[in-house]
Amino acid sequence: MSSIKHIADFPDKLNPMLVKELRQGLRGVGFVILFITLQAFLAFILLVTAASASSQNAGHLLSRVIFFFFSFAVLIVQPLRGISALSSEVRGNTIDLLCLTRLSAWRITFGKWISIVSQSALILTAIIPYLILRYFFGDMQMLAEVLFLLSIFLISITLTAFTVGFSGISSTIVRVLLPITGALMLFIYIWALFVSNRYLFQTMVQRLTLDTGSAWLGFLAFVVMCLYAGWMCLDLGTSQIAPVAENRSTLKRSVSLFFIMLALAVVTLAIDQVYIAIILGLCLCAPISLICLTENPHLVPPIAAPFVSKGMVGRTLGRIFYPGWATGLIYVLILFLLMQGVIFIFSLKGATIDDTTRMMVPAVFAMLLFPVAMTRLFARKNDNRFGLFVLFICTQALVFAVVISCEQWASNLELMHYFCWIPLTLPYLAEQTIFSSTTLLNIAYLNAGVYYLIALATTRPVWRQVGEVERQIQPAFEA
C-alpha cells in the first residue's frame, strides 16, 4: 500500500512550487467547473451535430464548436487565473518565507506559470477525443487543424506568462485591468473567428497547411516569438520579486541582444520584403526595451563586481548591461542602431524603401521613449516606473482618441497636426495629406531624439551612483 501511495504522489525532483500550485489548482473549484462544463458542452454539441446537421457541413460546424470552446477555456479563463499568482504572495508577505526554502525568484515564478500551463495541457488532452470523432464526419484537414490546436495552446502559454509575469507589479491598472481588457477584446475576436464568420476560420486553417517554404518560415517565426515573449514576461515577474542583489538584467539583455541580432540577420538574408523585416525587428525590440526602461536603477556591489574585475572593458560593458533604466537608454540606442542597420542593408540590396516604411522605426522608439521622458519631467520621485510607463502610453491613446472624435464632430476642425509631438499620432498622419512623407519622417526622428535627450539629461545622479559603487569595490581587484 505504501508503494502505491508513493507512485501516486508527485516525485521529489519536481519544483516544489509547481507541486503546491498544481495540487491546489486541480482541486480548485474554478478548474473543476471549467473542465466538467467544457466536457458536457462538447459532448452535447457532438450529439446534436451528429443528429441534426447535414453530412456536408457537420464536420466544419463541429470543428468550429470544438475550437471555440477550447479557445475560450485556454485563451480567456486559464490566463486570467494568473492575475493573482505573484500578488497573492506579495500581499501575504510570504515571498521571504519562500526564499528561506531555497527557492529562487525564478523557480517561484516558473512554478506558478507551469502549474497553470499543466492544467491547460490537461484540457488540451481532453479535446483530442473530440477531434478524433470529428474526423469521421469527413472533410477534415488533419495537419492544419492539429497545428491550429497546438498554435492556440502556444498562445495560451504566452498569455499565461503575461498574466503571471505582470501579477508581480504593484499597479492595479497594469496587473488587473490591462489583462481583463485584453481578455474582452480577445473574446470578441474569438467569437468572430469561430462563430460569426465561418469563412475566417477556413482561411486560418488554410494558412496552416504550410504548403510553401515561406509558410513554414512564418510558422517557425511565430513559435519563436511566442516563446521569446513568454520568457520575457516570466523574467519580468521574477525581477519584481527578486532581491536587489540578484542580477536579472545582464542575462536578459545579452540573450535578447544576441537573439535579435540573429533574427535580423536571418530575416535580412532570407526574405526580400523590408516591411516584414522591420515589423519582426520592432516586435522583438519592444518587449526588452519596455523592461529596460522601467528597471530599478539602484546598483549594488555584488552586481558590479564581475564587471569591475574585467577592467575598462568590463566597466564599459556595464554601462550597457547594468540593471536600471539609465543603462537601458544606452541599450535601447543600440537596438535603434540595429534597426537602422537593417534598413541600410536592404537599401544596399536595391530594395525600394519609402519614407512611410522608414518612419516606423523612429516612431515606435519614440512611443517607447515618450513615457520615460514624461516620467522624468513630471514624476521623477515615483518608484512605480512600470505603472507610469503604461499610464503615459494610455495617455497617448486617450489624447489621440479625443482629437479624432473632435475632428469627426466638426469636419472643418483640423487639430491632429498640432499633436504631431505625440508619437502615436504619426501613423494616422501618414494616411492624411497634411504633411508629406519626408516631413513626417523628420518629425519621427525629431520626436525620438528629443525624448531620448530629455531622459538622458536626467541620468546624471544614476551615473554618479554607479561610479561610487565601482570605486568602492575597485581596491579589492587592485590588491
Image (spheres, rainbow, N blue to C red):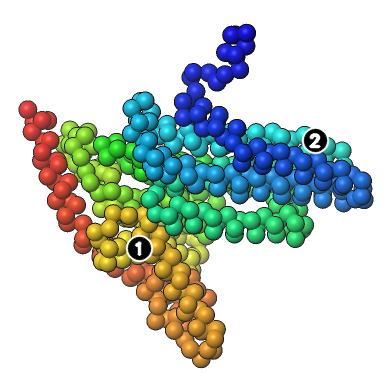
User: Can you name the residue that lies furthest to the bottom here?
Assistant: 412
Horizontal arrangement in the rendering, residue 17 relative to residue 271 (left or right): left
Report the residue marked by disc 1. Answer: 371
108 is higher (above) or lower (below) than 1: below
Between disc 1 and disc 2, whose residue precedes? 2
Q: Is residue 341 visible?
A: no
- Of 267 and 322, nearer the camera is 322
The image quarter in which residue 146 lies: top right
Residue sitting at 46 percent across and 69 percent down?
397
**Image spot of residue 5 (x, y percent):** 60, 14
Residue sitting at 48 percent across and 19 percent down?
13
**Image spot of residue 159 (x, y percent):** 54, 47
**Image spot of residue 439 (x, y percent):** 40, 77
Marking on residue 132: 2
- Of 171 and 408, nearer the camera is 171
Q: Residues within 10 Å of mark 1 (few under 14, many from 20)?
A: many
Local secondary structure at mark 1: helix
Horizontal arrangement in the rendering, residue 368 relative to residue 181 (left or right): left
Q: Is residue 3 visible?
A: yes
Residue sitting at 57 percent across and 35 percent down?
25
How far apart are the alpha carbons under marks 1 and 2?
Answer: 51 Å
Amino acid at circle 1: Pro
Horizontal arrangement in the rendering, residue 464 relative to residue 428 (left or right): left
Q: Residues within 10 Å of mark 2 (few under 14, many from 20)?
A: few
